[in-house]
């Protein structure tokens, strides 16, 4: 056990969450299995192992993902596109725990900081981070929760001057631009935004769309932090997946092409998905819809669902049953993905960003269990209607595609929590390293309160 006596923590020697972890394991949780194996491992060693050793021969799917990322980065003016894409080809790992949030959000910061530490400790020069931009703008009204609200500095702020009605009816990627950040204190928060070295700098930031705005803002926030900038944080979003899926559907030999356009394969997958989602052992996937795709109408994403089966199946919009307005043929689907009219659902996104290219997804609390479920879906579908190359099938069968990082690994409190809540250029992040990195994971996870939703799923 660690005997660390840093000033930020005075944690008892026992592992407060040991019983909770064992309960997750007994309930069939992949997250529980991963944490149980890591309890006695120093956090520094655990994080270092998240980054795979360099590889010399990327497969065709990873090459396609790198080309999609190159398209995205060049469009956004990234200063070192070639080095970033080369890193992905050699060191296949992306931090994928984030929803669209500013780095000042405590959970988002932990995801990013711990992945930065992992990259630093492994000697990597790039830390690739994906922020999911297809999330709803208002996940909860009371207390308010969503990507356009920020809990930081001991208070709550709105980031854009938009009504809750507008936000309720909008997906983050669909917010109409251009947008200008205008931080406003809410719920009695008292804070001088103009004098805040971070909020004051971001106030008035203009961007053509919300994902671009958060990429710009997070680049500025990260650049201001007291970290080793020899590790370059690079943020991407769902546009990379859209481009990658578009490339797949333009290739008749791609397994994604078969999933969407071969009725036998498509039906086999949907049967497997619906069966597994309905199974009591499923802990994290609440809904079998959408079927592969989302449709953007106005500022909101709508689920696309298939009615019927076989060649006569109809692609429809779930909210009103209307026919999908995009012709389901490869060129039209690829164009709609690139135009932001269609978006891949989470299953398809993980297939092209993680499972097929063999990229490790460093994720949060739920990801370990839903990626394990996705893997079973593809294996079962292929057993009924073969569509995967045997090397692709073996890759999907192998564990290790999704690994726990970020928030589940660290439950800060006391001075550590206050340090994160008031994050800025003055923050001594070396204090976090000193307080936590050489402690065993069994201590750093604290009481593991972030898994209560998994416990409820096990109990149902």
Image (tube, rainbow, N blue to C red):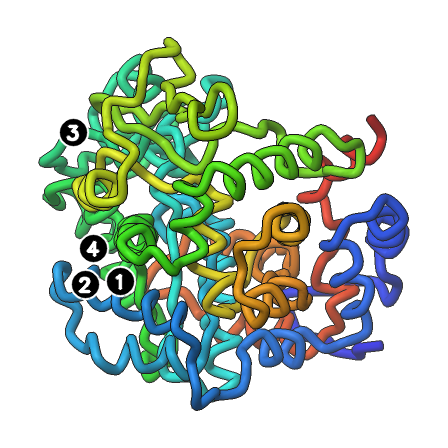
Say which element carries label 1.
helix
Pointers 3 and 2 in contact (C-beta within 8 Å)? no
Whichever of labels 3 and 2 marks the residue nearer the N terminus, that label is 2
Q: CA distance from mark 1 to mark 3?
A: 24 Å
Q: CA distance from mark 2 to mark 1?
A: 5 Å
Whichever of labels 1 and 3 marks the residue nearer the N terminus, that label is 1
In which quarter of the view is residue 248 placed? Answer: bottom left
Quarter holding the C terminus is top right
Q: CA distance from mark 4 to mark 1?
A: 20 Å
Q: Return the residue at label 1.
A: 68
Say which element carries label 2.
helix
Numbered circle sitting on residue 176:
3
Q: Is residue 56 above or below residue 101?
A: below
Q: Return the residue at label 2.
A: 71
Q: Is residue 180 left or right of residue 122?
A: left
Q: Residues within 10 Å of mark 1 (few under 14, many from 20)?
A: many
Q: Residues within 10 Å of mark 2 (few under 14, many from 20)?
A: some
Say which of 245 and 42 sits in front.
245
Q: Residues within 10 Å of mark 3 (few under 14, many from 20)?
A: some
Pointers 4 and 1 in contact (C-beta within 8 Å)? no
For image coordinates 67% across by 44% down, the residue present is 450
Q: Return the residue at label 4.
A: 216
């Amino acid at each position: 056990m660690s005997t660390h006596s840093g000033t930020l923590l005075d944690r008892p020697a026992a592992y407060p969450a040991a019983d909770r972890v064992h309960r997750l394991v007994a309930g069939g949780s992949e997250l529980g299995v991963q944490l149980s194996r890591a309890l006695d491992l120093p956090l520094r060693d655990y994080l270092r192992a998240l980054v795979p050793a360099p590889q010399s021969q990327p497969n065709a799917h990873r090459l396609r993902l790198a080309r999609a990322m190159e398209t995205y980065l060049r469009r956004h003016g990234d200063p070192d596109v070639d080095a970033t894409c080369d890193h992905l080809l050699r060191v296949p790992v992306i931090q994928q725990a984030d929803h669209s949030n500013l780095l000042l959000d405590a959970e988002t910061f932990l995801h990013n900081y711990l992945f930065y530490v992992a990259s630093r400790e492994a000697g990597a020069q790039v830390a690739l981070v994906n922020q999911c931009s297809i999330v709803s703008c208002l996940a909860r009204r009371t207390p308010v929760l969503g990507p356009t609200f920020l809990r930081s500095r001991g208070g709550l702020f709105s980031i854009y001057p938009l009504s809750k009605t507008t936000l309720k009816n909008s997906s983050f990627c669909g917010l109409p631009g251009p947008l200008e950040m205008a931080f406003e204190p809410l719920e009695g928060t008292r804070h001088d935004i103009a004098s805040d070295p971070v909020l004051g700098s971001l106030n008035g930031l203009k961007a053509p769309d919300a994902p671009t705005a958060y990429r710009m803002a997070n680049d500025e926030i990260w650049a201001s932090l007291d970290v080793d900038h020899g590790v370059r944080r690079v943020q991407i979003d769902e546009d990379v997946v859209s481009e990658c899926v578009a490339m797949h559907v333009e290739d008749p030999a791609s397994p994604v092409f078969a999933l969407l356009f071969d009725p036998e394969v498509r039906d086999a997958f949907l049967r497997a998905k619906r069966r597994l989602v309905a199974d009591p052992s499923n802990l994290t996937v609440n809904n079998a819809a959408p079927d592969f795709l989302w449709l953007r109408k106005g500022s909101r994403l709508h689920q696309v669902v298939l009615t019927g089966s076989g060649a006569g199946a109809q692609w429809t919009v779930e909210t009103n049953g209307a026919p999908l307005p995009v012709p389901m043929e490869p060129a039209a689907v690829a164009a709609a993905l690139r135009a932001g009219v269609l978006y891949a659902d989470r299953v398809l996104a993980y297939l092209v960003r993680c499972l097929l290219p063999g990229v490790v997804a460093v994720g949060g609390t739920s990801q370990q269990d839903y990626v394990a479920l996705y893997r079973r879906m593809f294996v079962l579908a292929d057993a009924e209607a073969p569509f995967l190359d045997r090397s692709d099938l073996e890759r999907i069968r192998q564990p290790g595609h999704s690994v726990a990082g970020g928030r589940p690994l660290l439950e800060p409190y006391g001075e550590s929590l206050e340090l994160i809540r008031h994050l800025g250029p003055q923050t001594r992040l070396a204090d976090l390293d000193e307080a936590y990195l050489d402690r065993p994971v069994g201590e750093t996870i604290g009481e593991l309160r972030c898994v209560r939703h998994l416990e409820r799923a096990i109990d149902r």
